[in-house]
Amino acid sequence: MTRMLHLVKATLLPRKPLPGFGPFDTSTTVLRVHPGDLDLYVHVNNGSYLQMMDVARSNLLGDLGGLPRLKAKGWYPVVAASTMSYKRSLQLFEKVTLSTRLLGWDERVVYLEQVFSVGDSFRARGWVAGRFLAKDDSRVAPAAVVEALVDGEAPPSPALPDDVAAWARAVDVAHREQTVRPGP
Protein backbone atom coordinates (compact mmCIF):
# COMPACT_ATOMS: atom_id res chain seq x y z
CA MET A 1 0.00 0.00 0.00
CA THR A 2 2.89 2.35 0.75
CA ARG A 3 4.12 2.26 -2.87
CA MET A 4 0.62 2.95 -4.19
CA LEU A 5 0.42 6.08 -2.01
CA HIS A 6 3.89 7.05 -3.20
CA LEU A 7 2.72 6.70 -6.82
CA VAL A 8 -0.40 8.76 -6.16
CA LYS A 9 1.74 11.53 -4.70
CA ALA A 10 4.29 11.39 -7.56
CA THR A 11 1.48 11.59 -10.13
CA LEU A 12 -0.97 14.04 -8.55
CA LEU A 13 1.66 16.27 -6.91
CA PRO A 14 4.57 15.91 -9.34
CA ARG A 15 8.07 17.15 -8.73
CA LYS A 16 8.88 20.57 -10.09
CA PRO A 17 10.36 20.49 -13.61
CA LEU A 18 14.14 20.56 -13.70
CA PRO A 19 15.50 23.51 -15.70
CA GLY A 20 17.20 22.30 -18.87
CA PHE A 21 16.13 18.70 -18.31
CA GLY A 22 15.67 16.97 -21.67
CA PRO A 23 13.93 13.78 -22.77
CA PHE A 24 17.19 11.80 -22.90
CA ASP A 25 18.48 12.95 -19.51
CA THR A 26 18.48 10.47 -16.63
CA SER A 27 15.92 11.04 -13.90
CA THR A 28 16.92 9.95 -10.40
CA THR A 29 14.51 8.77 -7.74
CA VAL A 30 15.75 7.92 -4.25
CA LEU A 31 13.65 5.45 -2.27
CA ARG A 32 14.04 3.46 0.91
CA VAL A 33 13.08 -0.21 1.21
CA HIS A 34 10.09 -0.49 3.57
CA PRO A 35 8.79 -3.58 5.40
CA GLY A 36 5.79 -3.60 3.02
CA ASP A 37 8.19 -4.17 0.11
CA LEU A 38 9.32 -7.52 1.52
CA ASP A 39 7.87 -10.94 0.82
CA LEU A 40 7.78 -14.00 3.06
CA TYR A 41 11.42 -14.73 2.19
CA VAL A 42 12.37 -11.31 3.63
CA HIS A 43 13.63 -9.80 0.40
CA VAL A 44 12.01 -7.26 -1.88
CA ASN A 45 9.08 -8.79 -3.71
CA ASN A 46 9.32 -8.63 -7.50
CA GLY A 47 6.05 -6.68 -7.61
CA SER A 48 7.57 -4.02 -5.35
CA TYR A 49 10.33 -3.44 -7.90
CA LEU A 50 7.66 -2.75 -10.51
CA GLN A 51 5.81 -0.37 -8.20
CA MET A 52 9.04 1.50 -7.47
CA MET A 53 9.57 1.75 -11.23
CA ASP A 54 6.06 3.25 -11.62
CA VAL A 55 6.98 5.98 -9.13
CA ALA A 56 10.26 6.68 -10.92
CA ARG A 57 8.55 6.96 -14.33
CA SER A 58 6.12 9.51 -12.87
CA ASN A 59 9.14 11.39 -11.51
CA LEU A 60 10.72 11.36 -14.98
CA LEU A 61 7.56 12.96 -16.36
CA GLY A 62 7.64 15.44 -13.47
CA ASP A 63 11.28 16.34 -14.18
CA LEU A 64 10.25 17.10 -17.77
CA GLY A 65 7.25 19.14 -16.63
CA GLY A 66 5.19 16.70 -18.65
CA LEU A 67 2.42 15.55 -16.33
CA PRO A 68 0.31 18.74 -16.66
CA ARG A 69 0.82 18.72 -20.45
CA LEU A 70 -0.28 15.11 -20.75
CA LYS A 71 -3.24 15.68 -18.44
CA ALA A 72 -4.36 18.70 -20.51
CA LYS A 73 -4.46 16.46 -23.59
CA GLY A 74 -6.18 13.62 -21.74
CA TRP A 75 -3.23 11.27 -22.33
CA TYR A 76 -1.92 8.77 -19.83
CA PRO A 77 0.85 6.14 -19.81
CA VAL A 78 0.41 2.38 -19.59
CA VAL A 79 2.97 -0.41 -19.58
CA ALA A 80 2.88 -2.63 -22.67
CA ALA A 81 5.71 -4.92 -21.55
CA SER A 82 8.48 -5.06 -18.98
CA THR A 83 11.33 -7.32 -18.06
CA MET A 84 13.68 -7.43 -15.09
CA SER A 85 17.10 -8.80 -14.37
CA TYR A 86 18.34 -9.02 -10.80
CA LYS A 87 21.92 -9.14 -9.62
CA ARG A 88 21.63 -8.69 -5.86
CA SER A 89 18.65 -8.31 -3.50
CA LEU A 90 17.64 -5.05 -1.92
CA GLN A 91 17.63 -5.16 1.89
CA LEU A 92 15.23 -3.68 4.42
CA PHE A 93 15.77 0.07 4.98
CA GLU A 94 18.43 0.37 2.25
CA LYS A 95 18.47 3.68 0.42
CA VAL A 96 17.94 2.83 -3.24
CA THR A 97 18.67 5.03 -6.24
CA LEU A 98 16.48 4.31 -9.24
CA SER A 99 17.78 5.85 -12.46
CA THR A 100 15.26 6.14 -15.30
CA ARG A 101 16.06 7.09 -18.86
CA LEU A 102 14.29 7.14 -22.18
CA LEU A 103 16.09 4.90 -24.68
CA GLY A 104 13.95 5.77 -27.70
CA TRP A 105 10.66 5.01 -29.39
CA ASP A 106 9.09 3.59 -32.50
CA GLU A 107 5.61 4.04 -34.00
CA ARG A 108 4.02 1.99 -31.21
CA VAL A 109 5.83 2.42 -27.89
CA VAL A 110 8.50 4.24 -25.91
CA TYR A 111 11.37 2.28 -24.37
CA LEU A 112 12.87 3.04 -20.99
CA GLU A 113 15.66 1.60 -18.89
CA GLN A 114 15.40 1.69 -15.11
CA VAL A 115 18.41 0.77 -12.97
CA PHE A 116 18.40 0.07 -9.22
CA SER A 117 21.57 0.73 -7.26
CA VAL A 118 22.65 1.12 -3.66
CA GLY A 119 25.69 3.36 -3.56
CA ASP A 120 27.97 2.06 -6.30
CA SER A 121 26.41 -1.42 -6.16
CA PHE A 122 24.23 -2.36 -9.16
CA ARG A 123 21.21 -4.33 -7.96
CA ALA A 124 18.67 -4.73 -10.79
CA ARG A 125 17.69 -3.45 -14.23
CA GLY A 126 14.31 -3.21 -15.87
CA TRP A 127 13.26 -2.41 -19.41
CA VAL A 128 9.82 -1.02 -19.98
CA ALA A 129 7.88 -0.59 -23.21
CA GLY A 130 5.17 1.96 -22.60
CA ARG A 131 2.23 3.26 -24.56
CA PHE A 132 0.23 6.40 -24.14
CA LEU A 133 -3.52 6.28 -24.43
CA ALA A 134 -6.15 8.98 -24.86
CA LYS A 135 -9.35 9.16 -22.80
CA ASP A 136 -11.17 7.21 -25.53
CA ASP A 137 -8.53 4.41 -25.19
CA SER A 138 -7.03 5.20 -28.60
CA ARG A 139 -3.25 5.01 -28.85
CA VAL A 140 -1.22 8.20 -29.00
CA ALA A 141 1.84 8.16 -31.27
CA PRO A 142 5.02 8.19 -29.18
CA ALA A 143 6.48 11.05 -31.26
CA ALA A 144 3.39 13.16 -30.40
CA VAL A 145 3.97 12.42 -26.71
CA VAL A 146 7.62 13.44 -26.96
CA GLU A 147 6.58 16.66 -28.73
CA ALA A 148 4.20 17.41 -25.85
CA LEU A 149 6.92 16.66 -23.30
CA VAL A 150 9.51 18.91 -24.95
CA ASP A 151 6.87 21.53 -25.86
CA GLY A 152 8.02 21.60 -29.48
CA GLU A 153 9.20 19.38 -32.27
CA ALA A 154 10.34 15.95 -31.14
CA PRO A 155 13.98 15.12 -31.72
CA PRO A 156 14.52 11.94 -33.69
CA SER A 157 14.58 8.76 -31.65
CA PRO A 158 18.03 7.28 -31.22
CA ALA A 159 18.50 3.73 -32.39
CA LEU A 160 17.63 1.29 -29.65
CA PRO A 161 20.44 -0.80 -28.19
CA ASP A 162 20.52 -4.17 -29.97
CA ASP A 163 19.51 -6.13 -26.86
CA VAL A 164 16.51 -3.88 -26.22
CA ALA A 165 15.42 -4.07 -29.86
CA ALA A 166 15.68 -7.88 -29.76
CA TRP A 167 13.62 -7.97 -26.55
CA ALA A 168 10.97 -5.69 -28.08
CA ARG A 169 10.63 -8.04 -31.06
CA ALA A 170 10.56 -11.10 -28.79
CA VAL A 171 7.70 -9.76 -26.65
CA ASP A 172 5.93 -8.42 -29.76
CA VAL A 173 5.74 -4.74 -28.81
CA ALA A 174 8.11 -3.44 -31.49
CA HIS A 175 6.73 -1.69 -34.53
CA ARG A 176 6.29 -4.10 -37.38
CA GLU A 177 5.76 -3.37 -41.01
CA GLN A 178 2.21 -3.90 -42.17
CA THR A 179 1.95 -6.68 -44.70
CA VAL A 180 -0.74 -6.63 -47.32
CA ARG A 181 -2.16 -10.03 -48.07
CA PRO A 182 -3.14 -10.65 -51.64
CA GLY A 183 -6.87 -10.96 -52.24
CA PRO A 184 -8.55 -14.19 -53.25
Image (spheres, rainbow, N blue to C red):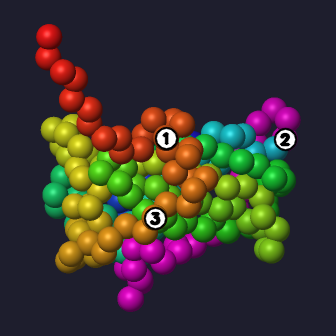
Of callouts 2 and 3, the N-terminal one: 2
Q: In this view, does 94 lie to the left or right of 69?
A: right
Q: Does the magenta stretch include residue 150?
A: no
In the figure, 70 relative to 83: above or below? below
The tag on residue 42 is 2
**Amino acid marked by disc 2:** Val
Q: What is the quadrant of the N terminus in the image? A: top right
- State the SS at label 1: helix
Q: Give the range drawn in magenta.
A: 15-42
- State the SS at label 2: loop
**Contact? badges 2 and 3 (CB < 8 Å):** no
Q: Is residue 18 magenta?
A: yes
3D distance between C-alphas at marks 3 and 1: 14 Å
Q: Is residue 9 left or right of residue 113?
A: left
**Which quadrant of the structure image shows residue 41?**
top right
In the figure, 97 relative to 54: above or below? below
In the figure, 175 relative to 64: above or below? above
Q: Name the residue under label 1.
A: 169
Q: Name the residue under label 3.
A: 159
- Where residue 114 appears, x then y in whole percent? 59, 60
Q: Residue furthest top?
A: 184
- Where residue 22 appears, x then y in whole percent? 39, 80
Of callouts 3 and 1, the N-terminal one: 3
Q: Can residue 146 be seen in this view?
A: yes
Residue occupying image coordinates x 22% and y 61%: 144
